[in-house]
Structure formats: structure tokens, C-alpha cells
């Protein structure tokens, strides 16, 4: 899957091992960045094709992103590459791999 290039200096570090994060965030690891006064969260090539969320804090952006993720998964078509990637990733257990 293609990913949007977001300059490193705009990216917000996220501790994907934090107990405060949901499994979906931990597994899919969307990129979080600051744009002006807003925070954005994205999985995919760009905000139009990808799964995108925004908010006034990084936490709010990730929460908004999860809302859009749930909607996208519920309405996913077989041709929606980003949704299918998310579904496949979330359905694979670490136990299935090893």
C-alpha cells in the first residue's frame, strides 16, 4: 500500500506500545502529524483515498481516525485497498504468524 510522504519535522511521535492506545491504532500504526493548529492521522496514500482523522490534539485526531476506520470497514468494497488492508491486518493474530 502506498503512503503519503509527510516530512519528518511535521510528524508527531506516537508510542505504539502504550497501553492507552487501542489495538487498532497499535496494529495499523497510522501516521500522526501537526498541520498548523490541527493534528491529522492517516493510513493510506492521501486524505482522500486513505482513512483520515483530525482533531485539536493528537489523541483527538486518533479518536476521529478510529471513527472513520470503523465506518470504512463496515462499508468496505472488495476494491477498497486501504479498507481491505486494515481488515486483513486486524484479522491476523500474532499467534497465526508464529
Image (spheres, rainbow, N blue to C red):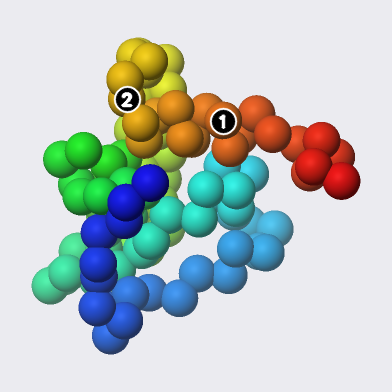
Task: Determine the residue positioned at 82% across, 35% down.
Answer: 96
Q: Are marks 2 and 1 in contact (CB under 8 Å)?
A: no
Residue 17: quadrant of the picture:
bottom right
Q: Earlier in the sequence, mark 2 or mark 1?
A: 2
Taking the image as drawn, is residue 30 in sight?
A: yes
Could you say where residue 79 lies in the image, as x and y percent from the top left? Answer: 31, 20
- Compared with residue 11, is residue 18 higher up or lower down, i.e. above or below? above
Residue 70: quadrant of the picture: top left
Residue 36: x and y in percent read 12, 72
Residue drawn at point x = 19 percent, y = 64 percent: 38
Residue 53 visible in the displayed image: no
| 15 is higher (above) or lower (below) than 30 | below
Residue at horizontal 61 percent and vertical 34 percent from the top: 90
Figure check: 98 above or below 11: above
Q: Which mark is residue 88?
A: 1
Q: Residue furthest bottom?
A: 9
User: Badge 2: how crowded within 10 Å, few (<14), some, or many (20+)?
Assistant: some
- Residue 89 image-quadrant placement: top right
**17 horizontally vs 80: left or right:** right
Q: Which residue is mark 2?
A: 80
Residue 31 x/y as whole percent: 38, 61
Q: Secondary structure at mark 1?
A: helix
Amino acid at each position: 500500500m502506498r503512503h503519503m510522504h509527510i516530512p519528518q519535522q511535521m510528524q508527531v511521535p506516537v508510542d505504539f506500545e502504550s497501553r492507552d492506545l487501542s489495538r487498532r491504532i497499535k496494529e495499523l500504526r497510522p501516521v500522526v502529524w501537526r498541520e498548523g493548529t490541527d493534528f491529522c492521522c492517516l493510513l493510506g496514500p492521501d486524505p482522500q483515498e486513505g482513512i483520515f482523522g483530525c482533531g485539536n490534539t493528537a489523541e483527538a485526531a486518533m479518536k476521529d481516525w478510529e471513527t472513520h476506520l470503523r465506518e470504512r470497514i463496515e462499508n468496505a468494497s472488495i476494491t477498497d485497498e486501504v479498507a481491505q488492508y486494515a481488515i486483513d491486518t486486524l484479522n491476523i493474530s500474532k499467534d497465526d504468524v508464529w
